[in-house]
Image (cartoon, rainbow, N blue to C red):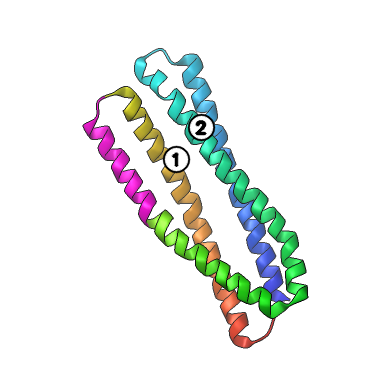
Amino acid sequence: MEILKAAIEWAKDEVFSSRFFILFAIMFILAALGFWQLGKTEVSRAFITPTLVAGSLLLAVGLGIFFTNKSRITSFDTAYHNDPAAFVKSEITRTEKSMGEYRTIVFKVIPFIIVAAALLIVFVDKPVWRAAAITTIAMMVVILLVDSNANARIETYHQQLQSVEQQGGN
């Protein structure tokens, strides 16, 4: 029963974490509106589209995480009560897959994208490309910050699952 509480707590933490993506998305969209309304120079006008796109992407990520984990909260209870051992096994498989994705995407791909965008700023002098690169870096930093915390949570949850499996209990 403790692992069910841990699973539900993890899902609730993910729902809370998704709100940060949504908050940053709103800030990016508001920045785009600000650049659109107040931007007088070519450089400031160049930020409109990239910040709007970044805000939209962060909003999609945040809402996706929110709704996915919101539904998990209720499904965990049903799955656990149907077969606790199968629940633990399926969660271990899912968390291992997620941790692998974090290792690849969050800790390898995103830093590579940040470096590529930084190089773009240095070597390209077009305002639109520089604005896109700066916005990309900002968006990737947001994702890196939020997802590094999510990775730490899922690793802790995974360890709890493994200890329950080793004990052979629930």
Main SS, magenta residues:
helix
In what quadrant of the picture does the N terminus appear? Answer: bottom right
What stretch of residues is rendered in magenta?
108-125
Identify the residue shown where x is 41% and y is 18%. Answer: 45
Give above or below for 134 relative to 111.
Answer: above
Give above or below for 168 relative to 107.
Answer: below
The reply to whether dot 2 and dot 1 touch (C-beta < 8 Å) is yes
In what quadrant of the picture does the C terminus appear? Answer: bottom right
Q: Position of residue 24 (x, y in %)?
A: 53, 38
Give above or below for 78 relative to 163.
Answer: above
Give the residue number, with chain letter if any, for mark 2. 28
The quarter holding residue 86 reads: bottom right
Q: Position of residue 27 (x, y in %)?
A: 54, 33
With 56 as the anchor, is 74 left or right in this view? right
Give the residue number, with chain letter if any, for mark 1. 139
- Give yes or no for residue 114 being in the magenta stretch: yes
Residue extending furthest bottom? 167
SS type, badge 1: helix
- Give yes or no for residue 126 being in the magenta stretch: no
Type of residue at label 1?
Met
Q: Residues within 10 Å of mark 1 (few under 14, many from 20)?
A: many
Which residue is at the front of the view, 14 or 98?
A: 98
Q: Is residue 42 visible?
A: yes
Numbered-mark total: 2
Q: Is residue 19 visible?
A: no
Which residue is at the front of the view, 56 or 6?
A: 56
Identify the residue shown where x is 51% and y is 32%. Answer: 28
Q: Position of residue 131 (x, y in %)?
A: 36, 28
Type of residue at label 2?
Phe
Q: Position of residue 15 (x, y in %)?
A: 64, 52
Residue extending furthest left? 123
